[in-house]
Image (cartoon, rainbow, N blue to C red):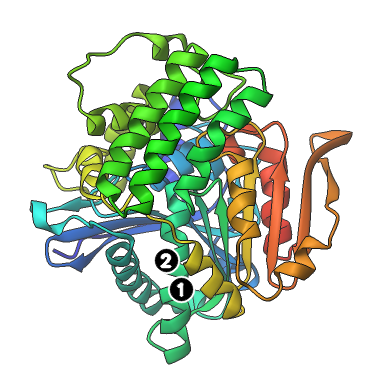
């Protein structure tokens, strides 16, 4: 099936916004499409041209990858984080489309508006995810040659970072051979699931030092984390995913329901008791996939946006296959990809790691641990640097972040932000993006 759609302007959103008495959306041009990346596996993408199509040749192209796996970039990343409009269809002042063309992709297949025709079409590991994305990117750059010569960056969040690392390595190889015609300029790994075990092993110390665990709680969390470590070391990765889920439950019980995405916020509804019979897959979907599919966002995506796009098959619901996406990736979930980052750096690819100070699920302590174990020959030089402070663009004289940059590696510590950095600190995230893409 070859379903295609394009829009010369945000005409539909204009009509919806104006009918609600809200200000019009920013001017711009869009395109969207499906690509059948494998037999029975259909991937959906949505592109926003920077300041209209005429400026596309002068600014970079950014592809945004959401986490989960099963979180939708065309939904959450677009309307909750960096797209031109928020979920209320109001203009976002810190949207990234003002500085770059932005390509949202619902991946792995089954995520968001992407879908599969049958169970065996789901991806089960990041190797398949990367292979699928190369098919999409080859198709995209062939159909839209205006982007072949502009710098192309991949930005990611959470599990999206694990996928982004694998995709970047395969894209680097493909671009060198001319199989994909693009000017790949770098990858940015935001609060990314690069080394899952390092995250789990630092949950206890992080929560303890922020006064969210007492000595008894710290002991409980450490014990649960050690079980995860043992499973990973024995390469029992599906068991490790199950034990990761158990460890999260131990954290919740000892912190009165801390928010894994921002330790300073708490949703009272998440503190309710859940059935002991709930499977670990269902439990993790509730914790980590459902928050990316809130009711208001789901209503928007399955309502006005679905009508706007006009190419979504009748049997496809936005987010309707998210649980299956997570379930099929469960065995691959706890596998690290630190070696992939090492290969990217050695190949000369520009790699950025950025992390939110208040994130728990992928805490900064864990990120720093795997970075310090990189085999990249530039690491000793990176380690000699002191970090540089960055002012918060929204508050003059207030530190918004710190960063280090050495050769082709950079690390950004984003203050007062949790897991979803563009949602928590939009101005700082926008400035960081401009720095990474060499626009400031």
**290 w.r.t. 135: above or below:** above
Residue 13, how many percent across, how many down? 43, 39
Residue 65, how many percent across, how many down? 44, 53
**350 w.r.t. 432: above or below:** below
Quarter of the rendering containing residue 429 = top right
Separation of marks 1 and 2 at Cα, in angstroms: 5 Å
Report the side of 93 relative to 33 (left or right): right
Q: Which mark is residue 169?
A: 1
Q: Residue at (77%, 52%) from the top-left corner?
A: 403
Q: Which mark is residue 166?
A: 2
Report the side of 61 relative to 382 (left or right): left
Report the side of 415 relative to 288 (left or right): right
Q: Residues within 10 Å of mark 2 (few under 14, many from 20)?
A: many
The C terminus sits in image quarter: bottom right
Q: Residue at (73%, 66%) from the top-left corner?
A: 438
Residue closer to the observer: 169 or 422: 169
Q: Residues within 10 Å of mark 1 (few under 14, many from 20)?
A: some
Instruction: Assign a secondary structure to mark 1.
Output: helix
Residue closest to the far left: 118
Q: Residue at (20%, 27%) from the top-left corner?
A: 279
Residue closer to the observer: 233 or 333: 233
């Amino acid at each position: 099936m070859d379903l295609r759609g394009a829009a010369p302007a945000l005409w539909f959103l204009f009509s919806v916004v104006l009918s609600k008495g809200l200000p019009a959306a920013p001017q711009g041009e869009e395109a969207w499409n499906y690509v059948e990346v494998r037999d029975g596996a259909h991937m959906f993408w949505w592109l926003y041209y920077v300041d209209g199509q005429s400026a596309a040749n002068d600014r970079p192209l950014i592809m945004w990858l959401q986490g989960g796996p099963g979180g939708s970039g065309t939904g959450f990343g677009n309307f909750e984080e960096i797209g031109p409009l928020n979920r209320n269809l109001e203009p976002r002042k810190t949207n990234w489309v003002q500085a770059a063309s932005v390509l949202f992709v619902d991946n792995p297949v089954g995520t968001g508006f992407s879908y599969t025709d049958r169970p065996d079409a789901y991806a089960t590991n990041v190797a398949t995810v990367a292979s699928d994305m190369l098919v999409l990117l080859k198709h995209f750059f062939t159909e839209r040659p205006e982007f072949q010569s502009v710098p192309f960056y991949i930005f990611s969040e959470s599990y999206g970072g694990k996928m982004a690392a694998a995709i970047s390595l395969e894209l680097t190889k493909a671009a060198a051979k001319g199989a994909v015609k693009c000017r790949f300029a770098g990858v940015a790994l935001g609060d990314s699931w690069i080394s899952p075990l390092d995250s789990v092993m630092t949950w206890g110390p992080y929560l303890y030092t922020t006064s969210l665990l007492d000595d008894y709680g710290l002991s409980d969390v450490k014990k649960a984390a050690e079980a995860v470590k043992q499973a990973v070391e024995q390469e029992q990765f599906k068991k490790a995913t199950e034990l990761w889920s158990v460890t999260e439950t131990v954290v919740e019980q000892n912190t009165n329901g801390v928010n894994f995405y921002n330790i300073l916020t708490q949703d009272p509804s998440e503190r309710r008791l859940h059935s002991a019979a709930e499977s670990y897959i269902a439990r993790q979907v509730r914790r980590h996939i459902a928050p990316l599919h809130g009711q208001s966002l789901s209503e928007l995506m399955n309502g006005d946006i679905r009508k706007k796009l006009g190419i979504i098959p009748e049997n496809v619901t936005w987010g309707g296959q998210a649980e299956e996406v997570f379930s099929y990736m469960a065995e691959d979930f706890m596998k690290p990809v630190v070696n992939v980052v090492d290969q990217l750096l050695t190949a000369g690819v520009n790699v950025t790691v950025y992390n939110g100070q208040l994130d728990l699920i992928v805490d900064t302590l864990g990120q720093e641990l795997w970075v310090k174990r990189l085999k990249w020959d530039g690491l000793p030089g990176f380690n000699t640097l002191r970090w540089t402070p960055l002012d918060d663009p929204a508050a003059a004289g207030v530190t918004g972040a710190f960063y280090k940059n050495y050769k082709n590696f950079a690390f950004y510590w984003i203050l007062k932000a949790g897991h979803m950095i563009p949602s928590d600190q939009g101005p700082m995230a926008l400035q960081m993006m401009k720095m990474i893409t060499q626009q400031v």
